[in-house]
Image (tube, rainbow, N blue to C red):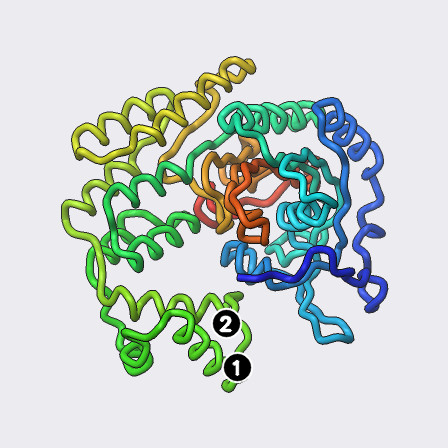
Amino acid sequence: MAFPDPTITIPSAEDIGLPSGGSNLAKGRSSDEAKLIDLFARRGFTRVEPPVLQPLEPFLELSGEDLRRRMFVTGDAEARELCLRPEYTIPVSRWHLALPGSPRAGAYAYFGPVFRFRDGEANEFLQSGVEDFGRQDREAADAEILDLALEALREMSAGPITTSVGDVGLFSALLEAMRLSGSTARRLRRAYAAGKVGTRALATLSSPSTSQNHAGLLAALQGQDPAAARLFVEDILKIAGISTISGRSAHQIAARFLDQATNGPSGLSEEQLKIFERFLAIAGHPDEAADALRALASDTKLELGRAVETLEIRNGFMEARGIDLSSLHFSASFGRNLDYYTGFVFEIRKAEPAASKPLVGGGRYDGLLRRLGSGEDVPAVGCSMWLDRVSSQGQGTDRRAEGTQVS
């Protein structure tokens, strides 16, 4: 999928009559900004500031469904679809790709406003964080990002916290080892990213999909050239005047139809269902979780060794940085609701109230730069901090499943 050239000049918010977002956030910004940017600079991260206005398409294709639904969308005089920056990872990634010479490595910090609809909270708010590209020592880089996030919260006097950690790579390794059909694997990945791979969701997936709502279209697509079939569906959507549905682009909708037509009815066997239930139940101390995952691999004869080894090596680097592993809660079912994560993920929340929203969230996204046009996977890891929640003494609670949202 080709995205807009990151070197194309996007007009500023002021150019099309939208607020830049900084004016409402000036109070208390300068001291927090100085603290965090100074900390990040000491750790080797250079500050960047991507435009507030961003091309819409990368966010539609690469962000989680939850975020897609809550973006502020606009356009310019040339009919380009734009959005107010809903987060920083994709904008910083595009900024990195646009650098002369296309360097593979780079370490960047940011501090500024982002915009998205939030229930019970301001739709315009400050985020600060870091993105680290190109490091081959992935496990060490993961540990450093978590350590930096914890240090940043100490700098901000955030108080008692809880830290949840997981690894999308473990779930991906399980799907690959089980050799599931494309449609079943895709459905499981979506459910996992949304934090919905519980007993009820697995029970649904254990039965083949029998929806007949689009049977005629699916029948027409079966056996067709994939590229031509995708264009056919996109043309139908354009004729109907449909560009997005529930935040999904026409390209994504076409890909789902093609996937269903290619794979046909699919689901999980009873044995596969039990394996997933056992995997998703693994939680607790990170070292004990690694032992439980090795036992699962041994009992089921599934090849999970490299993914589990990654977890064990990362645990070692965390301990070497002085992180108390007993203060971390590992869960095999823990994911973050953004589609680009590929490995280590984490969220840090205030200890009270128990259902508080994230203060910091982050993780590894090795495939993002390739999907944005780099031509190859580039190791990448980062994190973002919600400044309004860190400084708030009475933040709202999260009514959705813990560990699954990026609001």
| Residue for badge 1 | 238
Q: Which of the 4 image quadrants contains residue 186?
A: bottom left
Residue 315 position, x and y percent, is 44, 21
Which residue is the extreme one toward the front?
Answer: 101
Which residue is more in the foreground, 250 or 65? 250
Q: Earlier in the sequence, mark 2 or mark 1?
A: 1
Q: Mark on residue 261? A: none
- Amino acid on which disc 1 is placed: Lys
Contact (Cβ within 8 Å) of mark 2 with mark 1 = yes
> How many dots with numbers?
2
What residue is shown at x 53% (from left), y 79% (from top)? 242
Residue 249 position, x and y percent, is 52, 68
Q: Is residue 364 left or right of residue 105?
A: left
- Amino acid on which disc 2 is placed: Ala
User: Eyeballing the image, is 44 above or below 124?
Assistant: above
What residue is shown at x 27% (from left), y 73% (from top)? 211
What residue is shown at x 43% (from left), y 77% (from top)? 233
Which residue is more in the foreground, 221 or 199? 221
Q: Helix or strand or loop: what does disc 2 sit on?
A: helix
Q: Mark on residue 250? A: 2
For residue 406, say whether it is visible: no
Q: Helix or strand or loop: what does disc 1 sit on?
A: helix
Q: Is residue 397 left or right of residue 309?
A: right
Residue 300 position, x and y percent, is 17, 34
**For mark 2, does the 10 Å Cα neighbourhood hold few (<14), some (14 to 19), or many (20 or more) residues?**
many
